[in-house]
Image (cartoon, rainbow, N blue to C red):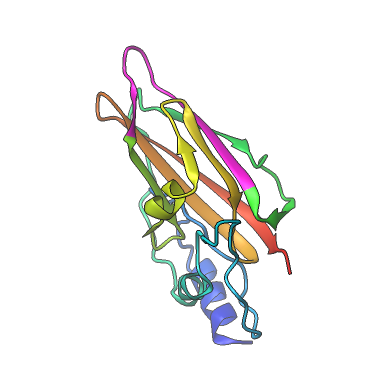
Amino acid sequence: MNALNHSRRKTMAGGAVLCSLLWVISVGAATSAPRAPAQAAGGQFLISDAEWQQEQATPEPPRPKFSPTPGAPRLELLQPKPGPETLASPFDIQLRWNAEGEARIEPQTLRIRYGWMGLDITQRVLAQAEVTSEGLRIRKAALPSGQHKLAVEIADSLQRVGRRQFEVKVQASP
């Protein structure tokens, strides 16, 4: 058993809390063969292979459970559809958000984080995404093969922060 799998089992056995304040991408078991980073059409990648490997090699500490602020923006994942299916990279990501009452979504407050370590990938995403007061759309998001968690947060005009976390399983195209 390699050190990575041993570390993951030890963390799981220790009952580590997987809730995060971030939209995080946690990737599955590493392979011994080197891989090139998954790249989008414009040559941009959301996560490099080295970042993926660092995320996998570091055990996750326990995290406090997140409690949303009453009235915070609601974030809905439209694409990809939640489920156990493996997605071919690159793939589209689409989120919709809504503010409560008279509040307005403040698109400039968008933050996107990868993995339990919270790597801020906001600028990488903004370089290839459409962001409006209604939502976000990333065409051809490229990620390495594996299991990933992303965490998205956005605030409204009343400084209430809405968060959404989702996981995807990816098989990068050869």
The residue nearer to you, when weighing 139 against 102, is 139
Residue 144 picture location, percent across and down:
60, 66
Q: Quadrant of residue 173?
A: bottom right
- Residue 27 visible (yes or no): yes
Residue 12 picture location, percent across and down:
53, 67
Helix, strand or loop for the magenta stretch, by majority: strand
Q: Residue at x 43, y 44 (%)?
A: 152
The residue nearer to you, when weighing 8 against 130, is 130
Q: Is residue 136 above or below residue 87?
A: above
Is 10 displayed left or right of 92 in the figure? left
Q: Is residue 119 above or below residue 137?
A: below
Residue 111 picture location, percent across and down:
36, 45
- Residue 23 visible (yes or no): no
Quarter of the image containing the C terminus? bottom right
The residue nearer to you, when weighing 108 against 3, is 108
Q: Quadrant of residue 92?
A: top right
Magenta highlight range: 92-107
Is 49 displayed left or right of 104 in the figure? right
Instruction: Looking at this view, name the residue that lies furthest to the top.
Output: 102
Residue 134 picture location, percent across and down:
46, 25
Q: Residue at x 39, y 40 (%)?
A: 153
Q: Quadrant of residue 108?
A: top left
Quarter of the image containing the N terminus? bottom right
Instruction: Determine if the magenta segment contains residue 101.
Output: yes
Q: Residue at x 36, y 36 (%)?
A: 154
Q: Is residue 85 above or below residue 94?
A: below
